[in-house]
Image (spheres, grey):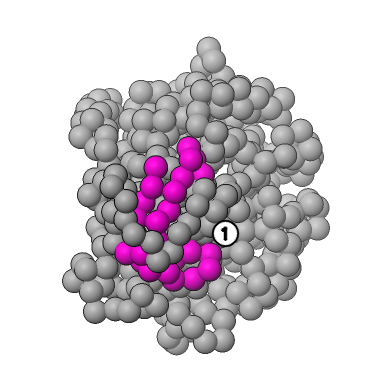
Amino acid sequence: MAIFANRALTAAGWVENLRLETSGEQITRLTPGAEAQPGDTRVDTLLPALANLHSHAFQRAMAGMTEYRLAGRDSFWTWRDLMYRFTAQLTPEQVQAIAALVYLEMQEAGYAAVGEFHYLHHQPGGQPYDRLAELSDRIMAAAAETGIGLTHLPVLYSYAGVGEKPLEPGQARFGNDVDRFCTLVDQARGALTAMPSDCRVGIAPHSLRATSPTDLAQVVAAQGQGPIHIHIAEQPKEVAEVQAGIGARPVDWLLANAAVDGNWCLIHATHMTEGETRAMAASGAVAGLCPVTEANLGDGPFNGPTYLCAGGAFGVGSDSNILISLTEELRSLEYSQRLRDLSRNVLVLGEGSVGQTLYCGAASGGAQALSRNAGEIAEGKLADLVAIDSQNPALCALRADQLLDGLVFAAKDHVVTDLWSAGRHQVKDGRHVNRDRIIANYQSAIAGLLSGL
Ligand code: ZN
């Protein structure tokens, strides 16, 4: 397959008239200053496509249901209670239909891949399915339907809080001990044989609240050869609970007690001291930032300037999927910093384009977090590619070197015309190739779900 782009952002910088050839999932040859050949897919501006590093797909179906203020002070914890009631109902078919819609929306927004932080494992009430990894299979089926690059991250969720508190009834579908969890991960790895070879299985110890220090060490030793994702410090209440229960703030504790390196992704590294921020950056782990969800849940802003100065890696995810928008995610990240610091152009070192720093940083960090050989356009990399239309009114006044600032701050996702996940051309003319079927399935799944609530 070959793509001809009027301009492209490659690992070597902006080039014009790029002919990009692929073989299967990989970019095999880049020829700048080329002529288009018959049969080439022609696009305007080609960029490396981002990975969405953190998703709980099923939560998309709750979007808009939790924005009504209840009496008293509403909080993350009241949101979580509603989420538990919602999850009590979901069938495997509904889980698959919702995930397919979510992955379609991600691809139309310009994401080539997703890290699915998957904690819904069992039947309502907590009884395992006949096949333990039934719901992991459904996530993989949704990825296969959409063609998105999946890094599947089954979640170890064993306790309701620090100190091995027993799970609450609302958490029954999530729970596993280490042994059963390892069986589940092995089943999910086995299912990879039916998936494209860019798909991965990692693990996700849910948080320091929902695992114990012993369990965390065991599961990392047994299954930690791929990506390891963990929710780390989303809420002040969580930081206080960890500090009281195991004697240190979560990031401090994790860095002191686990061999955190570039395989790790720390989701919601929101509440960190300056020291934790610098130490986390030095560890090589990726900060998994979810600015839209973090704003929606009232989590707080990330300590961006210190982290960036210390050379920390970061990527973005859509987490609760309240809104799936790549441009909104990146601009919310920068705007959260501006609102806190009463300043402009915060997330850039020294001098330079904020849009390019955010976009390219998230491309590289997202690929690292999902263990994808991607994040830039170069020979040998996966063909995770997105094309945007620079003639869109939001962008048409801009030079190439301003396009990413335009994309991040001035455009909506519908400037995306085409998207390839590891060479699979899934979005054409701004529409997912299986859009009608996936949306119809989603609508009928939701009708069934609502009638059961
Ligand atoms: Zn999350």
Residue 238 in view in this figure:
no
Residue 384 falls left or right of residue 369: left
Front residue of 366/259: it is: 366
In the displayed structure, would residue 70 be above or below residue 17? above
Residue 375 falls left or right of residue 449: right
Which of the 4 image quarters holds residue 398? bottom left
Q: Residue at x 53, y 57 (%)?
A: 378
How many dots with numbers?
Answer: 1
Residue 15 in view in this figure:
yes
**Quadrant including the C terminus:** top left
| Magenta stretch prevailing secondary structure | strand
Crowd class of label 1 (few under 14; some 14 to 19; many from 20; radius 10 Å): many
Front residue of 280/315: it is: 315
**181 in magenta:** no
Residue 174 falls left or right of residue 5: right
- Label 1: which secondary element: helix
**15 in magenta:** yes
Residue 187 in the image, given as x and y percentages of width and height: 61, 22
**Quadrant including the N terminus:** top left
Q: Residue at x 68, y 50 (%)?
A: 263
Name the residue beneath numbered marker 1.
365
In the displayed structure, would residue 21 be above or below residue 281? above
Residue 405 in the image, given as x and y percentages of width and height: 37, 75
**Amino acid type, label 1:** Gly
Residue 267 in the image, given as x and y percentages of width and height: 57, 55
Residue 359 in the image, given as x and y percentages of width and height: 46, 66
Which portion, as a residue range, is magenta?
A: 1-26
